Image (cartoon, rainbow, N blue to C red):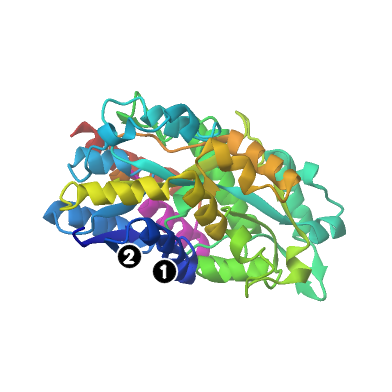
Amino acid sequence: MKKVDLEMWVMPNASFKTGLTFGEELKHFSKKYPHINVRVKVHTWSSAWKFIMEAVRTRQGPDIFQLGSSWVNTLAYLGGLADISKPIKELKKKDFFSPLNKQMEESFKEEKIYSLPWFMDARILFYRKDIFKKAGLEEKDIENWDSFQKACHKIETLKIKGKKIYPLAVSGAKSWTLIHDIAPWIWAGGGDFLKFKGKKIRLQQRESLEGMKFYFDLVKDYGSKNALRQNMGKVMEDFFIYGRYAMHFSGTWVFSAFLNPSSHLYRAEIAQNIGIALPPAGPKGRYSFLGGSNLGIAKFSKYPREAWELIYFLTSPASQLRYTKAISNLPVHSKIFNAFFFEDEQLAEKIKQICSCGRMFPQVFSWGIIETMIIEMLADIFHRIKEEKYTQAFLKKEVKKISSEIDFVLSL
């Protein structure tokens, strides 16, 4: 059989161990398809969009992309992804998706399909049970926006072993995750990003502004000024290793890093006091961000059949269970979602509750571009908070400006 070289671009799904972790999974693929060699290149989330767009523009790049689930429609619209509707007909669609991910399932109803979901992620509220106990708090005391704010105020007065404890661990470094962090607050306030089937920006509406205002006020009042100047990696260390903060919103991947006893990042005295909670409910409900990664074949790939074999393998139940456990992201297969948590039923139930209030970004062709624009705005706001120059007037001004620019993009 003819030897084939495939190139695949992925994100740092296992941090600095991404190459090693994914390489282990590819060994299983090689046993089944020894004639297909897979070369892997890792891009950071913050740079991946630029590289993928350049590959689509020049029609030179990998055979397979790992894509943020909200990027697929944009890249398909630009002609960068191959239509994989025919081979997908082989799949039992009703068994493929976790029932918690309704929006991914909706994509399978389209006439043409350009990607397969690989794994999911949800924003989880991690908190220190020992700090809560010292402050006289319980998990029920962060049930809604009002009680969450009061809990932050109470924690702010604490000192443990002479060290000040900050309520929230939030990084102000320019990061792809900023929009994931702000989204649940916008939705819980009754706001949204787009309206009229994705033809109009909605950030300027009162409910959206209220959600953003509430979150940025929390960051300003209860986040550490030092943390706001640190990158996300350092803030994660300070929360999960050094215990300097009481609460932190992050993804499921931390279970394999900071909460895994076999990890070099594990600190028993901290990890054993970590609890997880539902996001606080706002005036219009409780929401978590639900995202994930899809796999798509480049339209310019010379080996679409072999590329499909790799995608089909990586989205199979056996591969899903191995790889998602290795990186602590959530599997998309309904058959193995429970198996993923077979060791801890209570954790499984809590994760299900969090996912059940999860919501994804709008599935419109222009979202990839819009997302980048919003992230730039959020980075500017965080910069203002770091410089202690943030005001509500500045927030409204920035939102008005970016809304005008996004409406122009949507009008094209």
Residue 62 among those drawn in magenta: no
Counting from the top left corner in percent of width and height, residue 55 is at 19, 56
- Label 2 neighbour load within 10 Å: few <14, some 14-19, many 20+: some
Counting from the top left corner in percent of width and height, residue 152 is at 72, 53
Counting from the top left corner in percent of width and height, residue 298 is at 22, 49
The span shown in magenta is 370-390
Choose the circle earlier in sequence order: 2 or 1. 1
Q: Is residue 394 above or below residue 7?
A: above
Magenta stretch: dominant secondary structure: helix
Mark 1, residue position: 19
Q: Would residue 387 be seen by someone viewing this image from the given angle?
A: no
- Foreground residue, 135 or 357? 357
| Image point (42%, 38%), residue name | 361
Q: In the rendered structure, find residue 7 and report the number of the disc placed on it.
A: none
Q: How many marks?
A: 2
- Res 250 → quadrant: bottom right
Is the residue under label 1 in contact with that under label 2 (CB below 8 Å)? yes
Q: Residues under labels 2 and 1: Cα distance?
A: 8 Å
**In the rendered image, which quarter contains the C terminus?**
top left
**SS at circle 2:** strand
Q: Given the image, on which type of amino acid does mark 2 rest? A: Val
**SS at circle 1:** helix
Q: Residue 154 vs residue 38: left or right?
A: right
Q: Given the image, on which type of amino acid does mark 1 rest? A: Gly
Counting from the top left corner in percent of width and height, residue 407 is at 27, 35
Q: In the rendered structure, find residue 40 and report the number of the disc placed on it.
A: 2
